[in-house]
Image: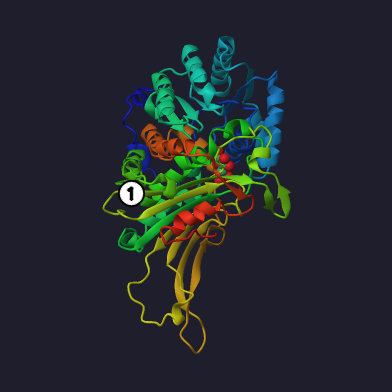
């Protein structure tokens, strides 16, 4: 680990920041070790992302990828698995010459996560790669493993001397969510990680931050003049942040049961979206500056006093989706018949700052909902006075600015317009910006962006410890309340969640958007 990484708090790099960010950012000599390489995430996201980065010319020519897992594989078996994953999931076209060069740097180390000898073997493999591929002692360790294995792997990295490189080399650790399952466990886990890695060498993944549309929230707000003056309690009525999925839990029962929707995505993805939507302008785009502003928002969050009236959790029952009959959550393989795990969660939060006092932020997520969509809708107050009769404005709603995170990435502004004709009638219309139409450049997949940032040591898109802890601090009282208040409400698969969620907004005189 370099002296600079040890310094802990000095996150900015003036030299690099001064460079024109439009130049391709190419990783220097380095390698990546993936623990849990046989898992879904690795196959569907990590391996394809690495190939795509190589294909775009953003990895060094001698890049090395080491897989570590409990499998009796040779290097070539591992290469075959990566090949299949790339063929199935990569976004860029397959090119033989890129593949060949990349595959020369593949190694596989079989072993259990607690096996000292396997970590010894890993160290030898890395030393060999440094010699043969010129990875120069720079290695990142990706913990794509169930959280219960995090502490063991991190300790083994320390004990086998892998956590520290030599002079002028770096070692970094990448940790997938969930980072704990409540505040206490997150703190515990953090102690273990901090004991081994300096804060600036720890990269916690929240893949939503790697999404192009999420990064655009700050560009939209702070590169323009027209939104910021009205982005506050004087004009905004409320904000709705929705992450809806049409899929069920698939083969993830082991992870999901007992975790549920709120811990799975509200604690991280949705609170991050809220922080970016609500934060003040950062003094720069440095990790430090963005972190400072996000933490202010998360620290100012207020929970409603009556959690029963302003939070809802649900569980999908059997229903129809895309013309097909689907089973309910309790009938999914591996789910306990009496499980009270939430597959839907909706909560109301307020942010106690001058800018947002009194403006509700409604966050909701669910599996097996009407369709897959993630969006942030900033809904504005009604005009204080309308010089029209009530009949003329029957079809006029509230103005809204909707950031469409996915799919159909873009931004929509909803406003009233005169309906063509001889009478005065005003109706809602939309003005649309679509990435696909406005840009010829393609967006990298979130994991591509994030893996590259780790290899470059570029931290702005990674939540820090305090953000994770604040996330749990917000969610813990809600989870506690739910745990002692019966079962989740049922909703039919393919609908927009339980009726209780509609009642929750109805109580505030509002309604959910049907995106
Ligand atoms: C993950 C959650 O973080 O995000 C999953 O664990 C969820 O449950 C996934 O399905 C959704 O990601 P995306 O990028 O498809 O919206």
Q: Is residue 252 above or below residue 278?
A: above
Ligand 1, seen in the image, is in the quarter at top right
Residue 31 appears in the picture as rendered: no
Image label count: 1
The quadrant holding residue 201 is: top left
Q: Is residue 384 above or below residue 99?
A: below
Q: Nearest the camera: 284 or 325?
A: 325
Q: Is residue 21 left or right of residue 322?
A: left
The quadrant holding residue 514 is: bottom right
Which residue is pictured at 70% across the width and 54% down the height? 322
- Percent coordinates x, y for residue 219 in the rendering: 40, 53
Which residue is pictured at 70% across the width and 18% down the height? 72
Mark 1: C-beta under 8 Å from nearest atom of ligand 1 = no
Q: Give neighbour class at mark 1: few <14, some 14-19, many 20+ (Cα, 10 Å).
A: many
Identify the secondary structure beneath mark 1: strand
Q: Nearest the camera: 507 or 454?
A: 507
Q: Mark 1 = which residue?
A: 351
């Amino acid at each position: 680990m370099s002296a600079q990484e040890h310094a802990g708090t000095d996150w900015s790099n003036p030299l690099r920041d001064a460079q024109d960010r439009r130049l391709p950012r190419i990783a220097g000599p380095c390698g990546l070790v993936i623990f849990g390489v046989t898992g879904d995430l690795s196959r569907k996201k990590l391996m394809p992302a690495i190939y795509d980065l190589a294909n775009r010319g953003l990895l060094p020519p001698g890049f090395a990828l080491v897989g570590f897992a409990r499998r009796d594989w040779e290097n070539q078996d591992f290469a075959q698995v990566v090949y299949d994953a790339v063929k199935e999931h990569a976004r860029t076209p397959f090119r033989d010459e890129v593949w060949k060069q990349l595959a020369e740097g593949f190694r596989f180390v079989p072993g259990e996560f607690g096996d000292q000898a396997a970590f010894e073997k890993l160290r030898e493999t890395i030393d060999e790669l440094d010699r043969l591929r010129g990875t120069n002692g720079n290695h990142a360790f990706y913990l794509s493993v169930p959280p219960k294995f995090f502490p063991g792997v991190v300790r083994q990295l320390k004990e086998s001397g892998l956590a520290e490189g030599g002079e002028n080399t770096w070692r970094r650790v990448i940790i997938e969510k969930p980072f704990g399952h409540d505040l206490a466990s997150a703190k515990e886990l953090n102690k273990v990680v901090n004991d081994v890695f300096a804060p600036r060498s720890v990269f916690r993944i929240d893949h939503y931050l790697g999404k192009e549309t999420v990064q655009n929230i700050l560009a939209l707000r702070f590169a323009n003049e027209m939104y910021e003056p009205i982005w506050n309690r004087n004009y905004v009525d409320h904000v709705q942040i929705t992450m809806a999925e049409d899929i069920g839990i698939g083969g993830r029962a082991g992870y999901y049961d007992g975790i549920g929707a709120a811990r799975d995505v509200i604690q991280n993805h949705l609170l991050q979206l809220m922080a970016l939507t609500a934060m003040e302008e950062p003094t720069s785009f440095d990790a430090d500056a963005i972190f400072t502003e996000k933490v202010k928002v998360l620290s100012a969050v207020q929970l409603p006093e009556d959690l029963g009236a302003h939070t809802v959790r649900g569980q999908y029952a059997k229903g129809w989706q895309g013309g097909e009959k689907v089973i309910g959550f309790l009938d999914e393989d591996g789910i306990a018949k009496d499980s009270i795990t939430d597959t839907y969660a909706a909560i109301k939060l307020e942010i106690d700052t001058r800018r947002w006092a009194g403006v509700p932020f409604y966050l909701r997520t669910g599996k097996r909902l009407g369709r897959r969509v993630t969006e942030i809708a900033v809904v504005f107050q009604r005009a204080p006075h309308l010089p029209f009769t009530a009949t003329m404005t029957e079809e006029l709603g509230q103005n809204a600015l909707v950031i469409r995170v996915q799919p159909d990435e873009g931004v929509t502004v909803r406003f009233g317009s005169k309906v063509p004709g001889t009478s005065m009638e005003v109706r809602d219309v939309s003005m649309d910006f679509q990435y696909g139409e406005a840009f010829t450049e393609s967006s990298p997949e979130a994991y591509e962006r994030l893996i590259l940032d780790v290899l470059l040591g570029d931290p702005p898109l990674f939540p820090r410890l305090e953000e994770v802890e604040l996330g749990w601090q917000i969610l813990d009282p809600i989870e506690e309340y739910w745990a002692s208040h019966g079962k989740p409400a049922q909703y039919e698969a393919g609908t927009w969640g339980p009726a209780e969620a509609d009642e929750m907004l109805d109580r505030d005189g509002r309604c959910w958007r049907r995106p």
